[in-house]
Image (tube, rainbow, N blue to C red):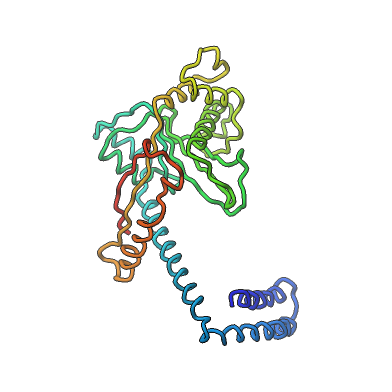
Amino acid sequence: LAVITVMFVTTCIMSLVILIVWKRTVLEALAFVLVFGSLELLYLSACLIKVPKGGWLPLLLSLAFTSIMCTWYYGSTKKQEFELQNKVSLDQLLSMGPGLGMVRVPGICFIYSDIVAGIPPTFAHFVTNFPAFHQVLVFVSIKSVEVPRIPPAERFLIGRIGPKQYWIFRCIVRYGYKDVHKDSFEFEDRLVSKLAEFLQHEDDHEEWGGRLCVVGTPSNTVATAVERRRRVRFLPPGEECGMRDEVREFLEFREAGVAYIMGHTYVKAMESSSAIKKLLVNHVYGFLRRNCRGPAVALGIPHTSLIEVGMVYHV
C-alpha cells in the first residue's frame, strides 16, 4: 500500500513537471496521468480489498507509531521554543554576578544544549541558585545534518563569546546520519585539541572574531601538548615551545578538572492549555521522555563528572 501510493503521488507530481518544466500542453499531462495513474489505481484498489481480511492490522500499527512520533516531535518542538524564548544573553549573565556573589572556580565546564545562540535557560537557572561556575565555559551543541558523513576536519565549529578574559566559547559539533559517535574520552580529547588549536591561531585570523569557524586538524605542536599533558600532567618549559601562553593556560585549566552540565528538564503544559495539549505533553510526551535513553547515556558522558540541572518548562 505504501509503495503503490508513492508511485501514484509521483505520477501526479510528474504531471506538474510536464506542464511547468517541460512546457507541454494540458492534454499531454492528462494523458500521462490517465495511462500510468489508471494502472496504479488498479493496484491500489487491490491493496484496499485486503484491508478487511487482515490488512487493517499493519495500518493500525502504522497509525500508532505515527501518533507516537508526532507527539514526540510536538513536545520536542515546544521544548525548543521555550529554550529559544527564555535564553539569556551574556550581558544578562554577567550582570547577575555582583548581586549573587558569583565566583569562578578552576577547570573546564562543557554545557550541553540544543540552542546555538545565547545562554541556555538551564545554565542561567543553575548559576542563579548556585552562583559559581568554572574558569572556562564551553557551550556545546550537537547537531545532526542531512548528509551521510561529515569529515572529521570539518566537524567542529568553534567561536568565542564575549571578551577574551571571560574564557567563554561556543562549539557546534556536526554529525551526519551515518556517522558513529565515539566514546566520551576520545570526544573530550578532540574537543580540547580543537579549542587549543583555535586559541593558538585566533590572533592570526581576524575574520574569526565573534564568528563560528571550522577548526581543522590540530597542528603537531598542539596535538602533542594535549596528549602529553593528559598523560604526564606536567611538562618542562622546553617541551611546549611555540605554544601561546593562552593555550598553555587553557591546558592547565583542563588539568584542574573537567565537568559536564546538562539540563534535566520536565516539560509541562500551562494551566490555561487545552485538555488535549495537557494529555499529549504531560502524559504521553512525559511518558516517552521518562522511558527513553537519557542524553547523558547517549553521549557517553561519565557519570562522575556530570551535573544535571533540574528545571520545569511550562509550554
Q: Residue at x 65, y 75 (%)?
A: 7
Classify residue 177 as left or right of residue 117: right
Q: Position of residue 177 (x, y in %)?
A: 57, 52
Who is closer to the viewer here, 218 or 298?
Answer: 298
Q: Point out the image quarter for the C terminus.
A: bottom left
> On the picture, is 216 further left or further right than 138?
right
**Above or below for 21 versus 175:** below
Residue 91 position within the rendered picture, expressed as x and y whole percent measured from the top left: 36, 38
Q: Quadrant of residue 289?
A: bottom left
Give the residue displayed 53% in from the left and 34% down from the top: 190
Q: How many marks?
A: 0
Q: Position of residue 54 (x, y in %)?
A: 51, 82
* Outermost front residue: 54
The x, y position of residue 308, in whole percent, is: 34, 43
Please tell me which residue lies in front, 222 or 273. Answer: 222
Q: Nearer the viewer, residue 232 or 247?
A: 232
Q: Quadrant of the N terminus?
A: bottom right
| 294 is higher (above) or lower (below) than 237 | below
Residue in the picture at 72% in, 75% down: 18
238 relative to 117, above or below: above
* Residue 152 occupies quadrant: top right
- 83 and 278: which one is in front? 278
Judged left or right of residue 151, residue 234 is left
Tell me what residue is drawn at x 36 percent, y 26 percent. Answer: 106
